[in-house]
Image (cartoon, rainbow, N blue to C red):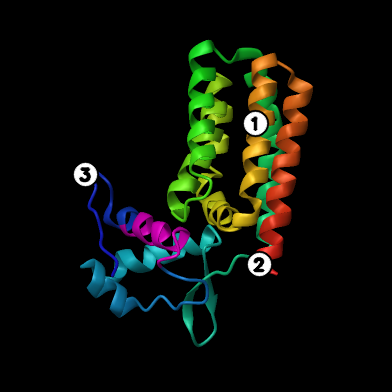
C-alpha cells in the first residue's frame, strides 16, 4: 500500500513523483507492473492530474514505459540502461577518487574508514536496503572529500538511477566479500594518497558491479 508524504512548499505533482519513484527504486512497484491511475489516485489521495504529470516525469527518467493498450508500466532493469549509467559513473568516480586522494582531511578519512567497517561487519545481513545505504554512504563520503560541489552534484544526480542496480548487486551474497575487499583497496589509496591506485580500485569496483548485475538480470 503506497502512502504519500506531503512536503511543505513542494508542488503536489512533485510529491507524487517522488513517492512513485521511491516505490519503483525500492521494488515496491515491480518491473512490468501497470500503474493504474484510478487505483493509485485512490491510494495516494490525489486527483489524476498530478498523477499523470508524475508519470510523465517518470517516463522521462526511464523508470516508466508507455505500453500500447496497457498504459504506463514500470520499466525493467535493462542492460543498455545499466551500461549507460555505469559509463558515466565510472568516469566521474575516477575523477572523484583522484581529487579525494589529494584533498581528503583526517576527519573525512576517519568517517570513510568508519563506514567501511560498518559495511564489513554487516556483510552477512539480509537487510539489503541497509547494506545498500551503507554502500551509498561510503561513496558519498568520498565525493564529499573532493571538495568540488559541482562534481558532487553531478554524482548525486546519478544516485536515484543507481539505487536499483546497487540493490541488485547487494543481493548477490556471494559477491559481498569481494565488495568488502574492493572498498578496502579504495581506503588504502586514500590513506596513501595514491591517485593511480585509487583510479584502478574504483574502476575494478565498478567493473565488478557491472558483471555481477548483468549476471542477475540476464
**Residue 194, how many percent across, how many down?**
74, 18
Whichever of callouts 2 and 3 sits on the residue coming sooner in the sequence is 3
- Is residue 19 part of the magenta span, yes or no? yes
Around disc 2, counting alpha carbons within 10 Å, would you say few (fewer than 14), some (14 to 19), or many (20 or more)?
few
Reply above or below: 213 against 193: below
The residue that label 3 is drawn on is 8
88 sits left or right of 6 in the view:
right
Reply above or below: 214 against 145: below
Q: Secondary structure at mark 2?
A: helix
105 sits left or right of 53 in the view:
right
Around disc 3, counting alpha carbons within 10 Å, would you say few (fewer than 14), some (14 to 19), or many (20 or more)?
few
The residue that label 1 is drawn on is 184
Which quarter of the picture shows residue 62?
Answer: bottom right
Which quarter of the picture shows residue 23?
Answer: bottom left
Number of the front mark, 2 or 1 = 1
Q: Secondary structure at mark 1?
A: helix
Q: CA distance from mark 2 to mark 1?
A: 27 Å
Reply above or below: 105 against 5: above
Reply above or below: 161 against 119: below
Amino acid at each position: 500500500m503506497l502512502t504519500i508524504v506531503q512536503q511543505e512548499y513542494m508542488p503536489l505533482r512533485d510529491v507524487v513523483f517522488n513517492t512513485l519513484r521511491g516505490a519503483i527504486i525500492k521494488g515496491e512497484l515491480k518491473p512490468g507492473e501497470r500503474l493504474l491511475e484510478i487505483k493509485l489516485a485512490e491510494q495516494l489521495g490525489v486527483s489524476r492530474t498530478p498523477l499523470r504529470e508524475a508519470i510523465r516525469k517518470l517516463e522521462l527518467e526511464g523508470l516508466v514505459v508507455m505500453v500500447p493498450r496497457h498504459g504506463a508500466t514500470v520499466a525493467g532493469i535493462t542492460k543498455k540502461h545499466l551500461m549507460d549509467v555505469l559509463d558515466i559513473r565510472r568516469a566521474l568516480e575516477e575523477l572523484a577518487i583522484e581529487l579525494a586522494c589529494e584533498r581528503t582531511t583526517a576527519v573525512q578519512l576517519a568517517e570513510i574508514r568508519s563506514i567501511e567497517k560498518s559495511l564489513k561487519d554487516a556483510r552477512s545481513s539480509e537487510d539489503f536496503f541497509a547494506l545498500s545505504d551503507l554502500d551509498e554512504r561510503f561513496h558519498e563520503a568520498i565525493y564529499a572529500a573532493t571538495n568540488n560541489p559541482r562534481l558532487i552534484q553531478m554524482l548525486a544526480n546519478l544516485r536515484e538511477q543507481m539505487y536499483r542496480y546497487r540493490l541488485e548487486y547487494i543481493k548477490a551474497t556471494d559477491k559481498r566479500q569481494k565488495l568488502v575487499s574492493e572498498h578496502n583497496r579504495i581506503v588504502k589509496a586514500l590513506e596513501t594518497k595514491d591517485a593511480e591506485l585509487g583510479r584502478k580500485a574504483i574502476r575494478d569496483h565498478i567493473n565488478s558491479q557491472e558483471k555481477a548485475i548483468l549476471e542477475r538480470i540476464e
